[in-house]
Amino acid sequence: MKVLHVVETAYRATLEEQDDTVLWLLQVLRVAGAELAVLLQGSAVSYILRTQDASGLAFGGWHQTRPPNMATQLAALIHDGVPVYAVEEDITDRGIRESRCIGGIRPLTRARVVELFDGFDQVWQW
């Protein structure tokens, strides 16, 4: 069964953990042999930026000692053969330049998202 995982909300639960919980789950599923792909849209397209740095995050006396690094998580998925797509309009709306992004991202227009859905048995929205 092929499953497309649509990630739309960025930085969910990353204050508590150093990973995005969905990306972590996808890594686990991939290791277990799942056939999957990822579509980033909305604020989650920011995950493709290589240059993000959440070090220094602090609340009162508490400091995040292991800040999230979504680009590294995505690069690992891509390295393992997981296709990672991102909606072009969402990238453009956020002023993200290709030169600042990790390699291997497959951009597609919002109009083509439905075509992408057709290639999967299930679509999970996160």
Image (cartoon, grey):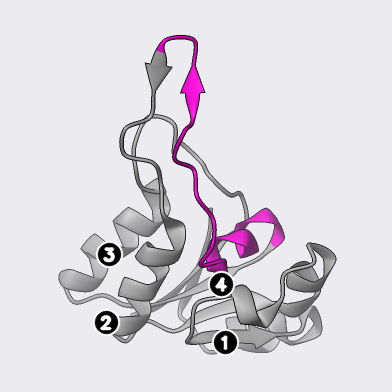
Under mark 2, the amino acid is Asp
User: Do the residues bearing badges 2 and 1 touch, measured as CB atoms within 8 Å?
Assistant: no
The residue sitting at the left extreme is 32
Give the alpha-carbon distance from disc 2 to disc 3, as whole Å: 9 Å
Residue 98 in the figure: left or right of residue 125 = right
Give the alpha-carbon distance from disc 2 to disc 4, as whole Å: 16 Å
Under mark 4, the amino acid is Leu
**Labels 1 and 3: the sequence-earlier one:** 3
* Residue 51 highlighted magenta (yes or no): yes
**Labels 1 and 4: the sequence-earlier one:** 4
Mark nearest the camera among 1 and 4 is 1
Q: Name the residue under label 2.
A: 80
Give the alpha-carbon distance from disc 2 to disc 1, as whole Å: 15 Å
**Labels 2 and 3: the sequence-earlier one:** 3
- Mark 3 Cα-neighbour bin, 10 Å: few <14, some 14–19, many ≥20: many
User: Do the residues bearing badges 3 and 4 touch, measured as CB atoms within 8 Å?
Assistant: no
Q: Residue at x 31, y 55 (%)?
A: 25
Q: What stretch is highlighted in magenta?
A: 42-61
Give the alpha-carbon distance from disc 1 to disc 3, as whole Å: 18 Å
- Looking at the rendered structure, the secondary structure element under dot 4 is strand
Q: Which residue is drawn at 53% across and 44% down?
A: 11
Picture quarter with the N terminus: bottom left
Q: Name the residue under label 4.
A: 39
**Camera-side residue of 71 and 6:** 71
